[in-house]
Amino acid sequence: MSFFKSIDETVFLWINHWIGTVSLLDQFAELAASDYFIPVAISLVLLGLWFSGDKSASRTVNQFAVISAILAVVIANLVVEASNEVFFRARPYDVLDSNVLFYKPTDSSFPSNPTASGLAMALSVWLWNKKPGRLLIAIALLLGIARVYVGVCYPFDVLGGAAIALGAALLSKRLLTRFQLVPLTLLRSARSIFLA
Amino acid sequence: MLGALLILVESYWFFASKYRNISDTAGGLDGNEQAFLFIAAAVAATFSLLVVSSIRNWSMKVESKLTGLSRLRNSNYIYLLLSLLGKK
């Protein structure tokens, strides 16, 4: 266990020590780690995806992807909440002599909640539609890496968030495929008022 | 193109006008508030778009066998809603 902790801290310090080297990189990392920038960007892509698709069939797949992403983010958040109830890991700035470019969150460092939420949405979309999914995965990973860079998460926190996201995305797809009647009823209702 | 430009300008304004990296315990938004505000804004934006595009394309009133969103290819949204209400 201490071996993994040591690797985690070493990688964290290596990434984090670049703060102050390139001012533009600091500003970009601060923006990417923000609670607003990437989560809103991903949500905007989901909104666009709902209305995209030339044919009704391709649009239905995209709309399933959006519903799946919403369900996955709910599942991922529930898992993170449950994990925070039973497990607490102090933030890097509380333990190590590191740089911080962000406000100091007080909840558990592990797992990374923004990574879990962002990647849960991204992976869900990828499971239904690869092209926008790849773009979203890249954006969500950027959020995770930026959180390490700005000094509020360890790399293993991000990996933990990613593992939760993967589980949530797979479960979400399975649930939607198994209980298709619920999303299909939702889509039928939206279609009846020309919104799907 | 205009839509993408608007998003970029608004994002710049949002982050440049004020320091935004504030904890939810110190006056920032928490995740639930943010999700609610995003949904409210998305609904408002979608309906504004539908109203504006309906006014702009007021003459588009073609009946077709298409369903759902596809009907907006040759009819405007307000006309479709009114004809839906007329059928009931």
Image (spheres, coloured by chain):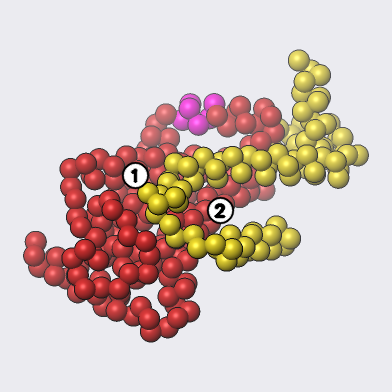
Amino acid residing under circle 1: Ala
**Residue at the farthest left position:** A2
Q: What is the x, y in percent for residue A26?
A: 43, 75
Magenta: main secondary structure: helix
Chain A rendered in what hue?
red
Q: Earlier in the sequence, mark 2 or mark 1?
A: 2
Q: Is residue B60 above or below residue A145?
A: above
Identify the element where label 1 is drawn: helix
Range covered by the magenta-colored residues: A180-185
**Residue A106 magenta-highlighted:** no
Q: Is residue B38 left or right of residue A142?
A: right
- CA distance for labels 2 and 1: 19 Å
Residue at 47 percent across and 73 percent down: it is: A27
Q: Is residue B13 above or below residue A54?
A: below
Residue at 86 percent across and 35 percent down: it is: B62
Chain B rendered in what hue?
yellow
Q: What is the x, y in percent for residue B2?
A: 74, 60
* Chain of the residue displaying label 1: A
**Residue at the farthest right position:** B59
Q: Is residue A74 left or right of residue A108?
A: right
Which quarter of the figure has residue A81?
top left
**Residue A76: image tag:** 1
